[in-house]
Amino acid sequence: MTKPVIGFAGMTHLGLNSAVASAERGFDVICFDPDATRIGALNAGELPVVEPDLPDMFARRRAQLTFTTDPGMLKACDVIYVAPDVPTDDKGTSDLGPIRGLIDRVGEAMAPAAILVILSQVPPGFTRGLRRSLATRYYQVETLIFGRAIERAMYPERFIVGCADPAVPLPPSLATYLAAFECPILPMRYESAELCKISINMVLVAQVTCANTIAELCENIGADYGEIVPALRLDRRIGAYAYISPGMGISGGNLERDLATFNNFGDALGTSTGVVRAWQHNSGYRRNWALRTLHTAVLCHATDPVIAVLGLAYKENTDSVKNSPAVALIEALLPFSIQAYDPVVAPRAQWHPALTASADPIAACAGADVVLIMTPWPEFRTIDIGSLAKSLRGKVVIDPYGMLDRRAALAAGLEYHKLGVS
Amino acid sequence: MLAHQNAHPEKPARVVVLGAGGVLGKPLLARLKADGVVALGVGSADIDLQAADASDKLQRLLKADDAVVFLSALTPDKGRDVATLMKNLRMAEAVASAVSSVKCRHVIYMSSDAVYPFGNGTVDETTPADPLDLYGVMHKAREVIMMSAVQADALAILRCTLVCAADDTHNSYGPNRFRRQAARDGKITLGGEGKETRDHVFADDVAELIRLVLVHRSAGLLNAVSGRSHSFAEVARLVAATFVPPAEVSFSGGGGAVTHRHFDVTALHQAFPNFHFQSLEAVVAEVHRRGEGRSDG
């Protein structure tokens, strides 16, 4: 078969990165979004999200990418992915209204024989419930990671494809497209694939929760979790890529959404969800590790302290602040002055009335009693500890992810706090 | 878990403290007086909350713009039986009826960490209440009684852990009893090996916390706990060291299952970022200082 033309509907994080990666794999891609402002920006070369490698790849493949607000242009596509980011509320519940509306618009515009693939996160039962021929309707699991979206889109471990009947071969256009990525393809029934997406995230959350639970005991028992991790990774049953680095709870929105979806189904169908609720509780508890450490180390004895916060994004290499531990921390420090720095996220007045933006990490620390390094941005590893110590008024460094060298910090006379270390 | 109804602190029109003569009532009234807050202390001699006419008397006393702090309770030293439970519930019935009729602007109910079971690891405000004894059952029942009588945005429930105070008469196991033992006998004897851990708070600090809840007109649930737990052996040694010469600490051995209690105080930090409970070391020293020269053993 000749190379199929690929369509993507919904030009938010998932759709844009997937479209650009498809172009990099050699396909012509038509990108539709009803938002004229978003399409206008993309046509002007302005990217709405921060992702490593995205700007270069976007520029390199610009000629293969068509951005349009006209759904009629999707008629030229053989395979169309519907891939908007599905919004969630504070409890992780998805709002499926926008994706349903987008599917309807795409369905009206696409060629009758074209294949429709739902790529967004949807709950089990969603794809089968659509009003469309089963023969041209598919669901595909996305495994986007914020900050690694291009890498994940270019080199997936496998494709998980939800089908009406997994015994029936995939249509040639979809099979040709997926084959270009040179990874295993796992067809399964719609509901299995939709639950597979949730299953992946649940296993990741279980690993993270386990790591955080062990790390906290390490903090109180004289151990260093950092010394334990390599031993875990060398265990074949755990593995080199396991999610076992300690952190401050799950954030970003997607994992939270899957846990909420699982609980909703479990409650409705009467299956056990107690362990999932324990993961959620532990996540909330660990999110406030920095706040508790700050109170113990500084706030319980300091008068009118100045607090420096480095990093606002929920993780490195992204501008997302959804459920960001840094933002949660700042919102719990209303009586105090805060000086913040993040490479891409600007401080927002809605978080805190006395939150000032600083030009760089050392400037943020000027005159501060304590600095908290809340996002593991790579550039924070290069902070000169001597300059940091001179800039601070106090001596306390709260560095959950260990961006600074602990021994160097202690040698500089700093009081150093890190996740998982006594 | 607390939501502040006042964006900025604001003194209540009047605070009515039920249980004015108790271990928390006295420091609370003193704290409110120092802050210039109009406060009325009501003790059992003023209104017997177990009496049939208690609700009527209380209704005549209360005003709609009052903030009511409900501290009155028969503590375990007065009895751990069903009869004591029922007396405590009758008191709550009277208070609930009165504040509901008058529609008081703000109500604080002082509950207890006895509503929580042991063995759940770190306790926070989301930990399910599953009391182990009638005292815990009493507080949980009184919480629900107050919730049925007061709008959610006008009711604060504080679950207080073990209170340490110079003039505490409850003589419950912990620093107060240890101090009396040391003063009387020159030694402190602990059951078992003293390994069990508990959280302890100073009565004056709890009074300050209540004041903060009042001026913010906070609603919801908060544990009144320090977040620092100590074994009874540590507590005994701290208390013993305040005496000259230091009191002897001995262990009776044996004992039942060892239980621990630790609290996550994130919700307290979030509600009142400037408030901190004093360390147990400071509390024990202060209680000893206040108790010096007094013979209450």
Image: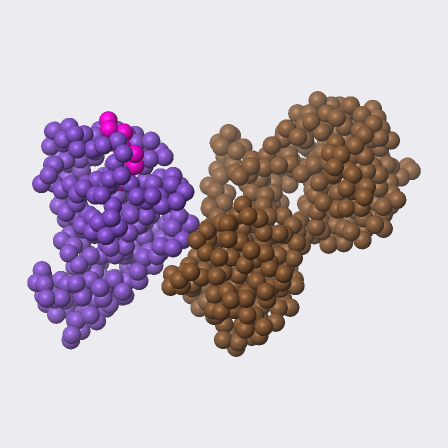
Chain colours: A brown, B purple
Determine whether, in the image, residue A409 is placed left or right of residue B246: right
Determine whether, in the image, residue B86 is placed left or right of residue A71: left
Residue occupying image coordinates x 79% and y 32%:
A69
The foreground one among A303 and A75 is: A303
Q: Is residue A230 above or below residue A197?
A: below
Give the residue furthest to the right.
A2
What range of the chain is rendered magenta?
Answer: B101-109
Residue occupying image coordinates x 63% and y 61%:
A359
The foreground one among B257 and B18 is: B18
Give the residue furthest to the bottom.
A411
Count of marks, rendered view: 0
Determine whether, in the image, residue B297 is placed left or right of residue B106: left
Residue B193 drawn in magenta: no
Position of residue B64 measured from the top left corner of the image (x, y, whole percent): 26, 31
The foreground one among A278 and A285 is: A285
Position of residue B221 measured from the top left corner of the image (x, y, whole percent): 35, 42
Residue occupying image coordinates x 65% and y 57%:
A343
> Is residue A166 among what the camera can see?
no
> Is residue A316 among what the camera can see?
yes
Q: Is residue B66 above or below residue A304?
A: above
Residue occupying image coordinates x 74% and y 52%:
A151
Position of residue B94 measured from the top left corner of the image (x, y, whole percent): 18, 31
Determine whether, in the image, residue B227 is placed left or right of residue A384: left
Which image quadrant for residue A261? Answer: top right
Position of residue B69 measured from the top left corner of the image (x, y, whole percent): 24, 41
Quadrant including the N terminus of chain A:
top right
The foreground one among A89 and A233 is: A89
